[in-house]
Amino acid sequence: MNNKLKALSITVLMMMSIVMLVLASAPAGASASKKAGTVLYGTHEEILVGSWTTATSLHFTVTSNATIDVYVLTASESINYPTGNFNAVKAVENTKSADFTIKSDSTNSYYLIIDNEDNSKSTDALPTGDASYSATYPNFMDIATKQVDTVVTTCLIGAISIIVIIIVVVIVLIYFIVIRKKPQPPVVQSPYGAQPVQYQQPVYQTQPQAYSPPAPSPYEPPPPPPQQGYSQQPPAPPGQQYPPR
């Protein structure tokens, strides 16, 4: 019984550990969106990426068959983009391939700009024709879903940990209540078909012993000797007197 209980405990703990590892390593929902298209000569395309309530890493990749400019702008700077007087959060100009990561804040929305025009900056690419592109960028809803999945996974791991602790406590209680219970005295089976007799420890009684006075001590002093010239006589019977000596 003891070995079976130990084996059951180990099996339960191993199963719970495997479940927690699977939940912890489970991938969350997709965190990126993809788009392919063509930017006509002398134009640009704006793609709304989104906004976040916490700082988040945003990864972008853009490839094209022609030389283009790639910008990431905040919502306020995207309004100034047509004037050419804007400040980009990230700028990769005069390229056919861009791969970068930025850190968002909790106050701005972001736009991905794919530029195939002359925007008056000295470092931008001059368009040569239509440009086909393929872009991968973070999506607000996808990242929000990932954050929710992370919260759910954390809650599940916490709940499973509590369940494991409860199971361990129950197993320990069962062990001390059932396995370590004080053994009962053996029951003696009668060979004649009588009811079993509960074995009891025999009780022995001692018989009282008769009292005997102690022997006189050899060290007691002897009685005093009789006085000289005096003899003690017993009293005379009534009406009689002893003659004087």
Image (cartoon, helix red, strand yellow):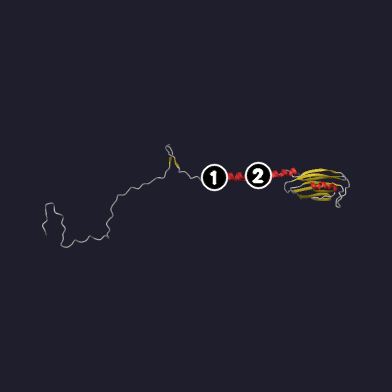
Number of numbered labels in the structure image = 2
Q: Position of residue 28 (x, y in %)?
A: 71, 44
Q: Which is more foreground, mark 1 or mark 2?
A: 2
The residue to which callout 2 is attached is 155
Residue 36 lies left or right of residue 180; in this view the side is right
Residue 153 lies left or right of residue 36; in this view the side is left
Quadrant assignment for the N terminus: top right
Displayed quadrant of residue 166: top right
Q: Position of residue 214 (x, y in %)?
A: 28, 54
Q: Position of residue 80 (x, y in %)?
A: 83, 47
Q: Is residue 27 visible?
A: no
Q: Is residue 222 above or below residue 36?
A: below
Label 2 environment density (alpha carbons within 10 Å; few <14, some 14–19, many ≥20): few
Decide which of tag 1 and tag 2 comes sooner along the chain. Answer: 2
Disc 1 element: helix
Q: Position of residue 94 (x, y in %)?
A: 85, 50
Mark number for residue 173?
1
Three-letter amino acid code at the position of disc 2: Cys
